Amino acid sequence: MKIQYNIAYFKKHGKEALYYQTKDSVVYCSLCPNYCVINLNRKGLCKNKINIEGKLFTLAYGNPCSAQIDPIEKKPLFHYFPKSRVFSISTGGCNFSCLNCQNHHISQVGADELENYNLTPEKIVETCITSNCPAIALTYTEPTAFYEFALATAKVAKANGLKTILISNGYINQEPLKELSKSIDAANIDLKSFDDHIYKKLCGGSLQPVLNTIKTLKENNIWLEITNLIIPTWNDDIAMIEKMCQWLIENKFENVPFHFSRFSPNYKLNNIPSTPINTLEQAKKIAIDAGIKYVYIGNVYDTHAENTFCPNCSKTIIERKGFRVLRNNIIEGKCSFCGENIAGVWE
Ligand code: SF4
């Protein structure tokens, strides 16, 4: 059924957006650093916010296009309750327009343009509990694009003793991030490059807000891991990777697990070859030499690149294959071989 975008419809069914102001019927959204200025009956860049008679409504509430159970390792989160099952949700829409987006069929269209489930935050939590999932993951597309739904779901989850995990591009303003941080437990933030021009060309965003997000999550005691997808000719410059690792060390992120991820040709970058393995290994060495303790290489199979090694005795403390944990030698947060504390939330 086609939705009629009018105030009567939204008064009855719609959720008003958070973080905006109106002047002369024009809406100024301040949820993310895109700061969209939205005229009457128009949508913001994320395609999920619409200005109806000077009020901003979200089109992404209670209508996830994806709802499925995943292993937590798929997010990836490697140092947070290994082997947990997480209930993953996303809606259509995104505040970035990455040329390489793996999920462009859902991220580059509005939530109202897809076939969706009808799942309120309460229903999601109820489904989690009956399916024995201790956590919800806000993932696949960008949770900032379904912020109101994400926040409400995280609040209901918390009230029911469930965890909420944020998988995000980190492109959100500080005030809404701090509000969301009160109800989430762990996050993996995609650090797409360490260069503002690349951010702009590749994703339509900028670097500094993402760095601010990473710092704020850490300050708010959210368990944090970071992912960097290395795309040949785009963000594989070794000097830039060195600079990124130096920034992480200077800002005391040495215990934050860092995932370099292998690019495969996709979407608008389907003419770029997969990342060479030696580029990923070189990046890993740079990160370890800089002082980052837990460094992984993702999307590469049949290697030890996704195992966790003790930073003290170098023994394998978690052995993984794909998204499976084969062996876990961490006992009470310590390496079972030498007793070294291993950063993470283990039990
Ligand atoms: S949340 Fe959406 S509408 Fe608001 S500023 Fe960001 S992209 Fe624009």
Image (tube, rainbow, N blue to C red):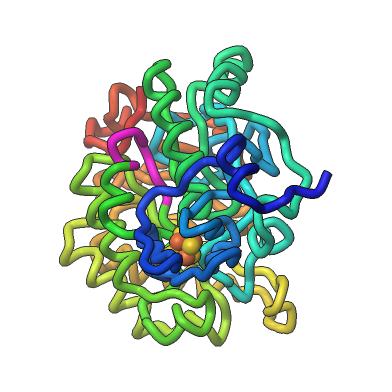
Comparing 117 with 15, the one in front is 15
Res. 4 visible in picture = yes
Instruction: Tell me if 73 is positioned left or right of 163 in this view.
Output: right
Q: Position of residue 283 (x, y in %)?
A: 42, 71
Q: Residue at x 23, y 56 (%)?
A: 215
Instruction: Tell me if 51 is positioned left or right of 157 in this view.
Output: right
Q: Residue at x 43, y 64 (%)?
A: 27
Comparing 53 with 312, the one in front is 53
Vertical side of 172 occupied by 98: above or below: below
Q: Position of residue 28 (x, y in %)?
A: 39, 66
Region of the chain picked out in magenta, as a range:
180-188
Please tell me how many numbered marks the rendered image carries.
0
Magenta stretch holds residue 29: no
Instruction: Tell me if 310 is positioned left or right of 307 in this view.
Output: left
Q: Residue at x 44, y 33 (%)?
A: 152
The quarter in which the N terminus is drawn is top right
Comparing 117 with 225, the one in front is 117
Q: Position of residue 221 (x, y in %)?
A: 23, 40
Q: Residue at x 37, y 82 (%)?
A: 196
Comparing 299 with 177, the one in front is 177
